[in-house]
Amino acid sequence: MKKWLLAIILVLSMVGLAACGSDDKESSGAEAKNKLQQIQEKGIITIGLEGTFPPFSYHEVSGELTGFEFELAEQIAKDLGVEAKYVETKWDSLIAGLDTDKYDFVINNISINDERKAKYDFTIPYMKSIAKLAVHEDSDITSLSDFAGKKAAQTVTSNFAQDARDLGAEIVATDNLTNSIELVLQKRADGTIHDQVTFLTYLQEQKDAPLRLVDGDVSSTDIAIILNQNHSEFREALNDSIKKRSEDGTFAAISKKYFGDNIISQ
């Protein structure tokens, strides 16, 4: 009799555990479907960026966070009816922060590529990135083909590092763009590849810097916000904001403030 009772109790326990597991799965599924609702109920959206990447995101002398993509993110947060909270992270671990839900999305001049699309989701593009090669003004590098076998100062997991590899260059690892340019100016690296507008902004601010852009575009890619997959409602809300502000001139005004021109995707 005791054996029968034990057997019944064991079966009921297993059923209960299975039900709990099912509830957990349903709860998890509900969370995935309602990412946008969760953010709006909380009133805060958490955004990942570098914060050391002028003019996209950087700190004023006062210490205040600012920049082109910072202002885009601020507008998007307003459109969602929430407050933006920023988590500054080094590039090499920035996108990986999505894996642990460190933030809700990342905005950091991130190009859309197949490798990233296999794991993450993207919004519609808000701009196009044209990659250029910068060298010391005394360098004998006059064309992109001259960069083969040279040393490229790059953050190792960036799309620009891959551009450098494609040109046959050897990567010298750095933490950010500022470090990369410093190595080139110190002649500890032969060049660095980055976004054209970033270089133009740098040269505008550092007029005496012995830095020269090599003729020719290294690559051209669409830039978008990156987020985790399976949050279609959230992604579409971001898309709606990007589309609206690209069409009404809001993003164009921000672009002209930082670059002197409108680089927003039309």
Image (tube, rainbow, N blue to C red):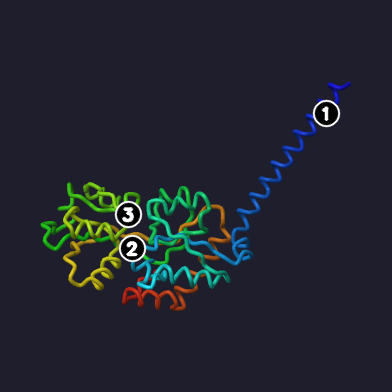
Amino acid under disc 3: Asp
Q: Secondary structure at mark 1?
A: helix
Amino acid under disc 2: Ser
| Camera-nearest label, 1 or 2 | 1
Question: How far across and how far down the image is residue 7, in percent?
Answer: 81, 25
Question: How far across and how far down the image is residue 115, in percent?
Answer: 41, 48
Residue 178 appears in which quarter of the rendering? bottom left
Q: Foreground residue, 35 or 155?
A: 155
The residue that label 1 is drawn on is 8
The local crowd at label 2, few if under 14, some if 14 to 19, many if 20 or more residues have their Cα within 10 Å, is some
Side of 32 where 255 appears, left or right: left
Amino acid under disc 1: Ile
So how many labels did they put on this image?
Answer: 3
Query: Gap in Å between the C-alphas at discs 1 and 2?
Result: 65 Å
Q: Foreground residue, 163 or 7?
A: 7
- Comes first in the chain, label 1 or label 2: 1
Give the residue drawn at x 58%, y 71%: 81
Question: How far across and how far down the image is residue 260, in percent?
Answer: 31, 77
The local crowd at label 3, few if under 14, some if 14 to 19, many if 20 or more residues have their Cα within 10 Å, is some
Residue most extreme to the front: 62
The residue that label 3 is drawn on is 175
The residue that label 2 is drawn on is 129
Query: Gap in Å between the C-alphas at discs 2 and 3?
Result: 20 Å
Side of 154 where 113 appears, left or right: right
Give the residue drawn at x 19%, y 67%: 209
Q: Secondary structure at mark 3?
A: loop
Mark 2–mark 3 contact, CB under 8 Å? no
